[in-house]
Amino acid sequence: MTFPELRVLAAVDAAGSFTAAGARLGLTQSAVSHAVRTCERKLGAVLFDRGRHGARPTEAGARAVARARRILRLLETMGAETRGPGPEGLAGPLRIAAFRSAAAQLLPGALARLAARHPGLAPEVRIVREIGRGTAGEVADGRADLGIATLDGTQPLPPGLVAVPLITEPYSLVHPAGHPAPRSLPLVDWAENCGSYTRDWWAGQDWIPPATINAEDDSVVLSMVAQGLGMAIMPSLALAMAPAGVTVVDLGPTGPRRIVGYVTTPELAGSAAVRELIRALRS
């Protein structure tokens, strides 16, 4: 595979059509089509379904595109890795994927420390819901250099990643302040709050009813609890900026906990920018 061919694969996946990919790369549609056919011949698999909808990666194509992105990223960092840091430290983009509460609570301090040492680095932070493949999937697919992820959830991490714990956070009961019987309230829950780290404990608590309200975001859950619509069981990162009008109650030493850490690829784990970000996160 050549560098231009890898770029074409990534561009077609991102743009969703051969024509749009050509516009991004300054190539004709026929040149893009020829490059894709060449890649398919070299790899021995159909990489894209073509049709009126444009071009969508096949299962084999998704794997090829993920590998192409990771190789392209290594080539992008090769110059900086070879030259080493300049007078003002490292420079260039640093792509980070994180779920909302981790991005809000763990990243600001780490990025401030990183900026003090390497003002030339340009972090790009994307918020990714920790559902399905989540932030780890973004790293595996070559869209992020490092992801902040839950490491003990029901969905196993994609193979071939480096995963290291950063913190263990406890869950707490959160309810409207002043309520005389918070455990009698209906449950407000959200889609990301469904990992194996809570499921076994949850099943043994006969006081927890089925959720009457399901939201897509933990901050929405907190707002609803503050308005007296129910109680919730939430991890500490989500509760770090709990609004006025709620009370947070520790669930004790037998309460559920979850592990939050970082994931990256073995090759990027050795890159200077990712190493410096990990250093900032751990400090």
Image (cartoon, rainbow, N blue to C red):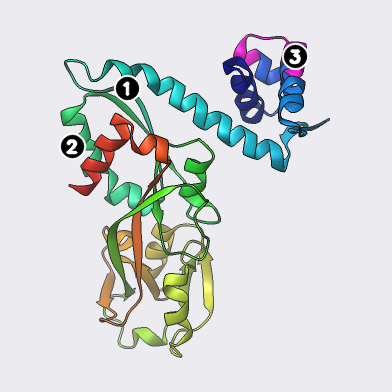
Residues at circles 1 and 3 in contact by the CB criterion of under 8 Å: no
Quadrant assignment, res 85: top left
- Of badges 1 and 3, nearer the viewer stands 1
**Does dot 2 land on a helix, a strand or a loop?**
helix
Left or right side of 117 for 261: right
Q: CA distance from mark 2 to mark 1?
A: 21 Å
Find disc 3 in the rendering and name its residue: 29
Amino acid type at mark 1: Glu
Give the image quarter of residue 110.
top left
Closer-to-camera residue (173/184): 173
Q: Which residue is mark 2?
A: 113
| Mark earlier in primary sequence (1, 3) | 3
What crowding class fits label 1: few (fewer than 14 Cα within 10 Å), some (14-19), or many (20 or more)? some
Q: Amino acid at mark 2?
A: Arg
- Look at label 3 and name its amino acid: Gln
Q: Residue furthest bottom?
A: 206
Residue 163 location (% of width, % of height): 38, 52
Where does the N terminus fall, quadrant-wise? top right
From where the camera sits, is residue 242 visible? no
How far apart marks 3 and 2 lie (CA) works out to 45 Å
Q: Position of residue 64 (x, y in %)?
A: 64, 34
- The reply to whether residue 203 is visible in this rendering is yes
Q: Please provide percent x and percent y for residue 67.
A: 57, 34
24 drawn magenta:
yes
**What segment carries the magenta color?**
23-34
Answer few, some or many: residues within 10 Å of disc 3's Cα (few below 14, many 20 plus, some between 14 and 19): some
Residue 195 drawn above or below residue 113: below
